[in-house]
Amino acid sequence: MGASDFHDIDIDFDQVERTFANSVQKAHVRFVSGQYEKKKNKALLEALDAFVLSGAIKLYREARGTKAFRHHTMLVHEGMRTAAHKELADRITDLWNKSGYYSATAYTRLRGLFDKDLGPVSRVRAGDIPTPNSFDEILPYLPKAIARIGGTRSPVLIVNSDKIESDQEKLDFDTTDHVWRILVGGNKLARGFTVEGLTVSYYTRVAKQADTMMQMGRWFGFRQNYQDLVRLYTTVELYEGFEAIVRDEEFFRSELRQYAAPVGGKPQVTPQDVPPLVGSHLPRIKPTAANKKLQQGAR
């Protein structure tokens, strides 16, 4: 999945209502609003519910011949300070334990989210992949999904640049049969760390540079047989920032295309001849940090 799978680029919805079928934003993006703890926990609980439901739907698909989903993960990223990661992990664990997943008390809430979100989105976006028509069809797979996520210890793993805590299980996608966990972390998760089976992302970390933000977009990637289940929980501000970066990149590519064709068998120009013109569709998002800039034209 790329940027066009999360952003309705160059689509005019002034005259047409957004639906799960015609809008990737409506299908895959859920906005997190409010800074109060109660509102944040409500959005985080919905993200956890989406993670549980999508896990059950994957098991439903496995039972109908779809290739097994070895890993199933959720990413939660609110900041880069390692000291805050333990607090966030504890908050998620507490929310998980109070959610009612291990009894039938959560089923009414899960049914509601399936009926308004995962069910209708999958029915119009899953294509030929087996898709449940009702919550009752995935009900038999919920206990197994919850057991895999909860495991025998904590459903949450902390992944950051510090040494992994000694009391938590090892995170290894290559040697572990099933990694069905909620991953909390900072720069290690945001940059260069491949998160296998990533299905739900809860992302609220603010960044001001385009290159940093693009490195943090871990929800982009190959999602075979579960693209319809992918959800991004983020703020309107961050979402608008990512969309502006997508537009900036397309503008930059169009600027380079005019020099792509050789003239007389030779390049028209070399990179040293023409400083790149970097667009800025959203002025508050800078292309990169000031200390990384060598030459830059701007529009």
Image (spheres, helix red, strand yellow):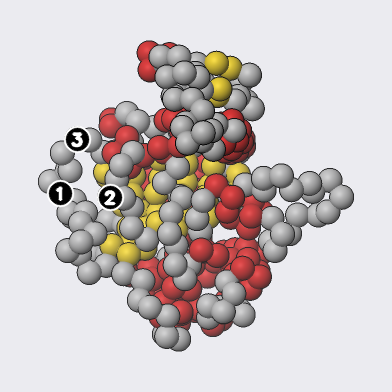
Going from the N terminus, do you reach mark 3 or mark 1 first? 3
Disc 2 crowd rating (10 Å Cα; few below 14, some 14-19, many 20+) is many
Dot 2 falls on a residue whose secondary structure is strand
Residues at badges 3 and 1 in contact (C-beta under 8 Å)?
Answer: no
Provide the residue designation for mark 1: 167
Going from the N terminus, do you reach mark 2 or mark 3 first? 2
Q: Which residue shows up at 55% across the image and 16% down it?
A: 297
Residue 221 position in % (x across, y down) = 43, 54
Point out the frontmost of discs 1 and 2: 2
Between the C-alphas of marks 1 and 2, the distance is: 10 Å
Q: Nearer the viewer, residue 59 or 114?
A: 59
Considering every residue shown, the one lying at the far bottom of the view is 64
Q: Quadrant of the C terminus?
A: top right
Going from the N terminus, do you reach mark 1 or mark 2 first? 2
Residue 277 visible in the picture: yes
Q: Amino acid at mark 2?
A: Leu
Between the C-alphas of marks 2 and 3, the distance is: 13 Å
Q: Which residue shows up at 54% across the image and 42% down it?
A: 234
Provide the residue designation for mark 3: 162
Whether 177 is drawn above or below 182: the answer is below
Q: Amino acid at mark 1?
A: Asp
Residue 207 visible in the picture: no
Residue 109 position in % (x across, y down) = 57, 64
Q: Which residue shows up at 47% across the image and 31% down it?
A: 267
Provide the residue designation for mark 2: 157
Whether 73 is drawn above or below 183: the answer is below
Point out the frontmost of discs 3 and 1: 3
Point out the frontmost of discs 2 and 3: 3
